[in-house]
Image (cartoon, rainbow, N blue to C red):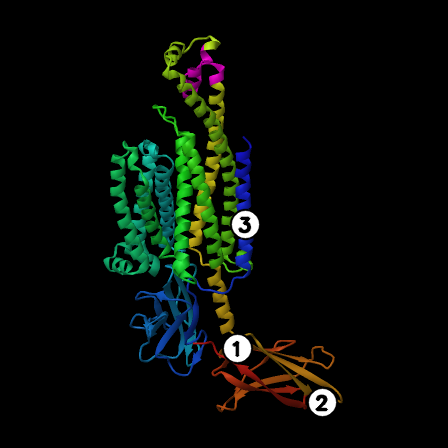
Amino acid sequence: MHTGPARSVGTPLTALALVVAVFALVLGGAGAAFAHAGLSGSDPADGAVLKAAPQYVTLTFTESVSFSEDSLRVLSPQNERVNPRPARHVDGKDNTARVELSGKLPQGTYTVAWRVVSADGHPISGAFVFSNGKPSETAAVVATGSPDDTAVGRLYGVFRYVAYSGLALLVGAAAFVLVCWPAAATVRPVRRLLALGWVALTASTVALLLLRGPYETAGQLTSAFDPAQLGRTLTGRPGGALVVRLVLLAAAAVSLRWLARRTADRTGLGGRLRWAGALFASALAVTWAAAEHASAGIQVALAVPVAVLHLLAMGVWLGGLITLLLLLRRRGSDGQEIPASAIGRFSVLAFNAVAVLVATGVYQSWRQVGSWEALSTTSYGKTLLVKIAAVVLVLCAASFSRRWTARLGHEASPATATATAALMPAVSAPERVRVAQGVGAPTPAAGQEPGGAAEAPAGDGPGDSAEAPLSEADAYRRGLRRMVTAEAVLGVVVLVVTTVLTGTQPSRAAGERVAVASAAEPQAQVVTVPFDMGTANHQGTVQVTLTPGRVGENTVEAVVYTPDGGLATVPELRLSLTQDALGIGPLDAKLKNLKGYWAAYDLRLPMPGVWTLNITVRTTDIDQVTVRDTVRITSLPG
């Protein structure tokens, strides 16, 4: 009796230990990758000051992007649009976007606002500025915040939850009927569950198809019914996947009606129907995998089937749990109760589904996170930690559910064997007739008849020997019902967190964008130059810091030190910069005395290259010294 439960507890714990080991291996050796597009460069560069107005504005992203007519807008200092035509890809490169500007642009600061859709179907947005001739104040207003933080974005997120829930109910209930207990197809709650899953998935898919256009373009909710916008949605990959999903659901409706007619003939639920159901569920899951995270980044050919398996395992496990819970709580007037053998078959099916969930989840985590540090420093990693904690709780609940299932199975097995043995003497003697006459008799002998033992599991025997197994079996079912309820609740939590993850920028992408920004933006340039302070053996130093040390506006701070390293106070400090190779300068930094150091916050350097610093330090009212050094100024990649 205790062997089965011990294995049931040990197996999930062993699997969990293996998961931790694999997690450490794959996350420990992960490298860089892409998922969710990020802006890697622009021409003009952010903050650039140009001598002449550019003809184009070009953006380069870390992966392929798609865009609409208003995806890229260039706004003048008066908040007027100066790109008359929509964006186009550059030379057929899917990771670029370019707009042509108007012929004559007045001097001032221009704002570039962009919103594109990455290859995994999620919109991203941003903005930057450049100046023509000289900087100016700008009245351009650009929306800030998350692309999903809009009325349409929030509504789109709600229907994504509904779609995942509908998939779980539809796939899980169908799997339970086809694999575990075909007779469940005749049970009204199960048929209602199948219908609810179909309706939820169909309605949410239609809503997502209508909302996809304004979700991508940050449009108003009323634009969901715009025929032109809906036409653009249908030509895109996410919209095409939603259309395919609707076609599959229409086919599923026809199949479910046919299945309802065949419920009286249980032989109709054979191997061919199971394979057809598996094929349909896989095709349904592909409509997610082909348009979300798995469709972009590294190892797409492997990531898509892994995502399909992950979705199917989630549906079989969670939807099957809800189906089992309904059947365990059912008290039908016909007395039909789910047999222990069906519960045992689902226990095996659910265990395999959870194993697939864990295995595919480990791979997806490695692919999207990439490092241990990202688990605690990115939104995706923190959400993933919540999911991992929920999965661990699910494994614990599943181990207890398997223990109750094993006890129920052991309880059913002796009763079945006794019933088989009791039927053997009935062939030569009318024992069943005598038992029927003794039903309700108070004599102990009647309850001890072999035939009476055979009838005891059906609940017809009044003796104490017949009531004890029934009471124990009911206790096992109540315990199983409680654990299945807890497991189902945790499963819903896992489903919610999974839906959040599919709409969150993966940690690899966030890390890649940080890496791009770090590589593009130089660190501050620091130059330390010694100078003669005018007295014997007294040589001071002046330290000049340019931040960020690139083309455009820079902050300059200068500090004078005494020979012993203390701060020195000087009457005057001047700084000018020249670029001898191009004959530019001298440009006066116009340093101001800020009581302890000298600074200027609006020095603009028009060209990259090696610049010469001319530093003049006046040490007394009549003494001054000029020293020189060089610094390299860089520009952002365009």
The answer to whether the residue labelled 3 contacts the one labelled 2, judged by CB atoms less than 8 Å apart, is no
- Residue positioned 65% across, 82% down in the render: 542
The answer to whether the residue labelled 3 contacts the one labelled 1, judged by CB atoms less than 8 Å apart, is no
Task: Please give left or right for residue 68 compared with residue 387 in the image.
Answer: left
- Residue positioned 39% across, 83% down in the render: 52
- Residue positioned 40% across, 62% down in the render: 124
Give the secondary structure at mark 3. Answer: helix
> Alpha-carbon neighbours of circle 3 within 10 Å: few (<14), some, or many (≥20)?
few
x, y percent for residue 375: 53, 56
x, y percent for residue 328: 42, 31
- Residue interval drawn in magenta: 446-466
Q: Considering depth in this image, is 333 or 99 the residue closer to the camera?
A: 333
Q: Is residue 463 visible?
A: yes
Q: Main secondary structure of the magenta part?
A: helix
Q: Considering depth in this image, is 35 or 328 the residue closer to the camera?
A: 328
Which comes before the other along the chain, label 3 or label 1?
3
Q: Nearer the viewer, mark 3 or mark 2?
A: 3
Separation (CA) of disc 1 from disc 2: 31 Å
Up the image or down, 597 lies above or below 256; here it is below
Separation (CA) of disc 3 from disc 2: 73 Å
Q: Is residue 589 visible?
A: no
Q: Which amino acid type is shown beneath numbered disc 2?
A: Gly
Separation (CA) of disc 3 from disc 1: 53 Å
The quadrant the N terminus occupies is: top right
Up the image or down, 203 lies above or below 458; here it is below
The quadrant the C terminus occupies is: bottom left
Residue holding disc 1: 554
Q: Which amino acid type is shown beneath numbered disc 3?
A: Leu
x, y percent for residue 98: 34, 73
Residue 463 among those drawn in magenta: yes
Q: Quadrant of residue 457?
A: top left
Instruction: Report the disc number at residue 534.
Output: 2
